[in-house]
Amino acid sequence: MTALTKTDFNFKGQKSVYHGKVRDVYNLGDKLVMVATDRISAFDVVLPEGIPFKGQMLNQIAAKFLDATTDICPNWKLATPDPMVTVGVMCEGFAIEMIVRGYLCGSAWRAYKSGVREICGVRLPEGMKENQKFPTPIITPTTKAEIGEHDADISKEEILAKGLATPEEYELLEKYTLALFQRGTEIAAERGLILVDTKYEFGKHNGQIYLMDEIHTPDSSRYFYAEGYEARFEAGEPQKQLSKEFVREWLMDNGFQGKEGQQVPEMTPAIVQSISDRYIELYEHITGETFVKEEGADLAARIEKNVAAYLG
């Protein structure tokens, strides 16, 4: 198995390139070419080994959900000329990520357990337990961090005060976020899953707000298996989940949480294989489809050929 962890393309009309944590974005002026690499990040740190087929899986899941939500809001996707590539319209992104939570878990639970009762300006009820469903989904935005930096919680009031969005824009961002989460929840239920939490990124194109980047992937979302949820919750047992949380848990079990001075544990071939296998499981449960591996020794050459053919 091979993994694509670095790209250095020069597409027709290319103006610049941005290498993100896991995606490389090529600016063609009027459109973007986003390459979903096989890099993997956790605790805002890019891990040293790539995960074979991860980029393909995430790109194909995102494309599927972007197509399934066009009636809710416009999105940036124009085409997927390669299993690891999406071409879309150029948007000016908002400097925030809209995180929506239907259940108390993950970082929100860790904060709650430590005594925190307000996240991003949202008051949390007393007496909640881990993995408990909120009365209604809550929105807890974060700032968008550069590589090596950490995302930071931010409230609606702070977003407006800093001019990161106008009141009218933020109202629409909230509307889109909740509607997309509802659609994702409905689709997940059809697959026997619970969409626990997720994040959305938005930008503006020709003055209109567009949904950007990925949507409802296991990198941006957390899913529980619906079957057995209530029994596990009542018994205080961990939920069976589909998300990247298993990677975070493996790192924490091995003494890494992205803090200064900590070392990423060794990612042996067996660990890499197990993570790849879990991602395939995620893909098949989330989409309801069998994952078809697009194998090849030179992934970069394939991508370059397919994108060039699309661009003409």
Image (cartoon, rainbow, N blue to C red):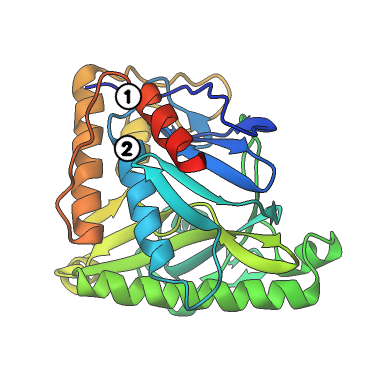
Q: Is residue 26 above or below residue 301?
A: below
Q: Which mark is residue 3?
A: 1
Amino acid identity at mark 2: Lys
Q: Name the image quarter holding residue 117.
A: bottom right
Q: Is residue 219 above or below residue 28?
A: below
Horizontally, residue 297 falls left or right of residue 116, namely: left
Between 119 and 148, which is closer to the camera in this rendering? 148
Extreme-front residue of the structure: 312
**Contact, mark 2 vs mark 1 (Cβ under 8 Å):** yes
Between 51 and 266, which is closer to the camera in this rendering? 51
Disc 2 is placed on an element classified as helix
Residue 234 showing in the rendered view:
yes
Name the quadrant of the N terminus: top left
- Dot 2 alpha-carbon crowd within 10 angstroms: few under 14, some 14 to 19, many 20 or more: many
Horizontally, residue 3 falls left or right of residue 20, namely: left
x and y, in percent, of residue 63 in the image:
39, 56
